Amino acid sequence: MTKADIVDIVAEGTGLTKLETEAVVEGFFKSVIEALSSGKGIEIRGFGTFKVKNKAARYARNPKNGEKVYVPEHFVPVFKFSKDFKNQVDNSLKKVSN
């Protein structure tokens, strides 16, 4: 599913135009990026949690030549699904596979 697909589905369900819906979707994405960039976490009940994780500096190996490479400390965004989200997906796929 692409962002355009999401816009289509939300526009159909809300009665908003696709242009208005696209602005809302873009606004949501921008808000998430800005919050994570400033070190804040986001919790959406029943959906999941966005947060930033600090990865310590380490040495890794280049898979092409096996050479040791230094990877500096860096921050990565992570998403953890809620239990409700996981259960709904699991139950829906069990019904489809039966």
Image (tube, rainbow, N blue to C red):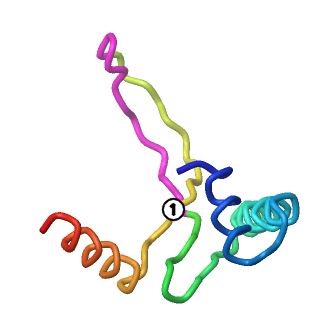
Q: Where residue 74 sits: x, y (%)?
A: 58, 48
Q: Where residue 28 sits: x, y (%)?
A: 75, 68
Residue at x 82%, y 65% (from the top left corner) = 27
In the image, farthest residue toward the top: 65
Q: Quadrant of the C terminus?
A: bottom left
Q: Is residue 63 left or right of residue 37?
A: left
Residue at x 82%, y 72% (from the top left corner) = 16
Q: Where residue 42 sits: x, y (%)?
A: 63, 78
Quarter-of-image position of residue 36: bottom right
The number of discs equals: 1
User: Is residue 91 positioned above or below 78 on the image?
Assistant: below
Q: Is residue 74 magenta?
A: no
Q: Where residue 5 sits: x, y (%)?
A: 62, 53
- Which residue does the numbered mark 1 point to in the structure image? 78
In the image, farthest residue toward the left: 98
> 46 and 53: which one is in front?
46
Q: Residues within 10 Å of mark 1 (few under 14, many from 20)?
A: few
Q: Is residue 28 left or right of residue 53?
A: right
Identify which amino acid the numbered label 1 is placed on: Val
User: Is residue 65 positioned above or below 83 on the image?
Assistant: above
Quarter-of-image position of residue 77: bottom right
Secondary structure, mark 1, is strand
> 89 and 40: which one is in front?
89
User: Is residue 12 positioned above or below 85 on the image?
Assistant: above
> 86 and 56: which one is in front?
86
User: Is residue 12 positioned above or below 68 on the image?
Assistant: below
Residue at x 33%, y 13% (from the top left corner) = 64
Q: Is residue 54 magenta?
A: yes
In magenta, the rendered stretch is 53-66
